[in-house]
Image (tube, rainbow, N blue to C red):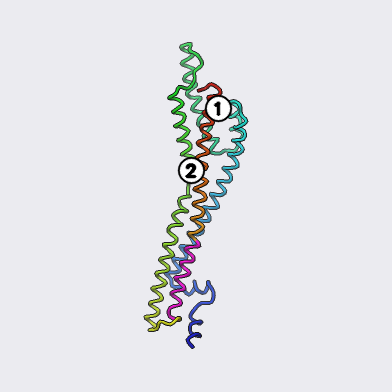
Amino acid sequence: MLLLQSSAAIPSTPVELILASSMVTKVVLAMLVVLSLLSWGIMLAKWLEFRRMRTAALAFTREFARATSLEQAVAAAKKAPSSPYNRVFARAVNYLREVTQRATAEAAATGAAKPTLTASQVEALRLLLDAETTSERDALSRFIPSLAVIGSVSPLMGLLGTVLGVISAFIGIATKGSGNLAAVAPGVAEALIATATALAVAIPAVFGYNIFAARLNRFDGELEGFGSEIIALMAREGRI
């Protein structure tokens, strides 16, 4: 008789378990579902963004590596799809043109030789490239910290659901005046399903955050190296 009561008290499927749970547990599960959809949406969007950026960057860097002059590199940047590399290069070219135009006008007035960038101007160019690299990195890292937040908050919400489930189990024991399985099982089941849902939300979010953070660090290093290549190209042409 006790076994029959226990089997009747415990839902037979996860859907029945959720439907039979308390309103507070349903609210916790609904919030976890929202966080899960948000994290998967962010991961999909960032994956597509990184993929487009990598494709456009490879198309430009190949042409840039073949360029033997700054003019050829400028032409390659105009034909290639937009990417952080194009924008960093365009920022360097604009700075070079502004500095060169002023220096050329001064040289024409004084009859001096062809102007080149001074040491202070080269340092300013380096700082400009670093600032542009940081700006591109910040733009690419948008929403990635949200994955870390979801990965941290979800287990806490699951813990909340666990505590509420345990409280429900004790209330069941108190109201029924018995500690048998029929009184304890519903609350324990609620606690377990809340914990399992929280882990299912947190684990992919943490994995996604670590993967995208690693890609972002690699992108930052590659973009800094590309800035050095720009300065090297200008030095080969005698502009520095």
State whether residue 178 is above or below residue 49: below
- Of 5 and 29, nearer the camera is 5
Residue drawn at x 48%, y 55% is: 206
Q: Which residues are magenta?
A: 182-200
Question: Where does the image place residue 237, in percent across and percent down from the top left?
Answer: 56, 22
Question: Where does the image place residue 106, in percent across and percent down from the top left?
Answer: 46, 16
Residue drawn at x 47%, y 65% is: 30
State whether residue 91 is above or below residue 112: below
In 3D space, how far apart are the residues under numbered discs 1 and 2 (Cα atoms)?
27 Å
Name the N-terminal-most of marks 1 and 2: 2
In the picture, the disc for residue 139 is 2
Q: Residues within 10 Å of mark 1 (few under 14, many from 20)?
A: many
Q: Residues within 10 Å of mark 2 (few under 14, many from 20)?
A: few
Question: Where does the image place residue 149, in percent across and percent down from the top left?
Answer: 44, 54
Q: Mark 2 falls on what kind of element? A: helix
Please name the amino acid that badge 1 sits on. Answer: Leu
Q: Mark 1 falls on what kind of element? A: helix
State whether residue 165 is above or below residue 149: below
Q: Is residue 104 on the magenta stretch?
A: no
Q: Is residue 186 on the magenta stretch?
A: yes
Q: How many callouts does the rendering have?
A: 2
Judged by its main secondary structure, the magenta piece is helix
Q: Mark 1 highlights which residue?
A: 233
Instruction: Kindly give the residue lying farthest to the bottom in the view shown.
Output: 1
Question: Where does the image place residue 124, in percent across and percent down from the top left?
Answer: 44, 28
Residue drawn at x 48%, y 75% is: 20
In the picture, the disc for residue 179 is none
State whether residue 18 is above or below residue 183: above
Instruction: Kindly give the residue lying farthest to the top in the view shown.
Output: 111
Please name the amino acid that badge 2 sits on. Answer: Ala
